[in-house]
Image: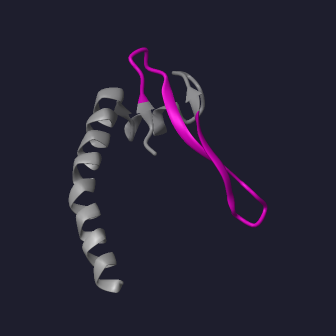
Amino acid sequence: MYVIRLGDGTLRVPRSLTTDDGRIIGNAYVEVVPGEPDYERWLAESITEEEDAERRRRWREGDDALEQAFLAFKAEQD
């Protein structure tokens, strides 16, 4: 999950909810607006919604080769 910078400057920062022993219960985004604590820190590592969409598109395209390699490996195991 990435820090996403919206057009109005709001940041969507990923957060995980965990149990006391560290198991992840869920993941979500919280919105941080300019002027809030840590805004500048998160801004430095943020990407735009368009950059996020492009990364997801490239990831999906790369899945085809990975899936074929997995299927070949799986066939060898049978």
Q: Is residue 18 above or below residue 7?
A: below
What colour scheme has been applied to the protein in the rendered image?
Answer: one colour
Q: Quarter of the image containing the C terminus?
A: bottom left
The spot of residue 61 in percent (x, y) is: 22, 48
Horizontal relation, residue 59 to residue 1: left or right = left
Name the chief secondary structure element in magenta: strand
User: Quick check: is 23 in the magenta stretch?
Assistant: yes
**Residue ID at (70%, 64%):** 22
The spot of residue 51 in percent (x, y) is: 28, 34
**Residue ID at (55%, 36%):** 38
Horizontal relation, residue 12 to residue 74: left or right = right
Task: Specify the segment rendered in magenta.
Answer: 5-29
**Residue ID at (47%, 39%):** 41
Q: Is residue 62 above or below residue 2?
A: below
User: Quick check: is 12 in the magenta stretch?
Assistant: yes
The spot of residue 77 in percent (x, y) is: 34, 85
Nearer-the-camera pick, 56 or 37: 56
User: Which quadrant of the figure has residue 56?
Assistant: top left
Q: Which residue of the protein is positioned furthest toward the front in this rendering?
A: 78
**Residue ID at (34%, 29%):** 48
Nearer-the-camera pick, 37 or 12: 12
User: Which quadrant of the figure has residue 54?
Assistant: top left
Q: Which residue of the protein is positioned furthest toward the bottom in this rendering?
A: 77
Q: Which residue of the protein is positioned furthest toward the right in this rendering?
A: 20
Count of residue discs: 0
The spot of residue 10 in percent (x, y) is: 48, 22
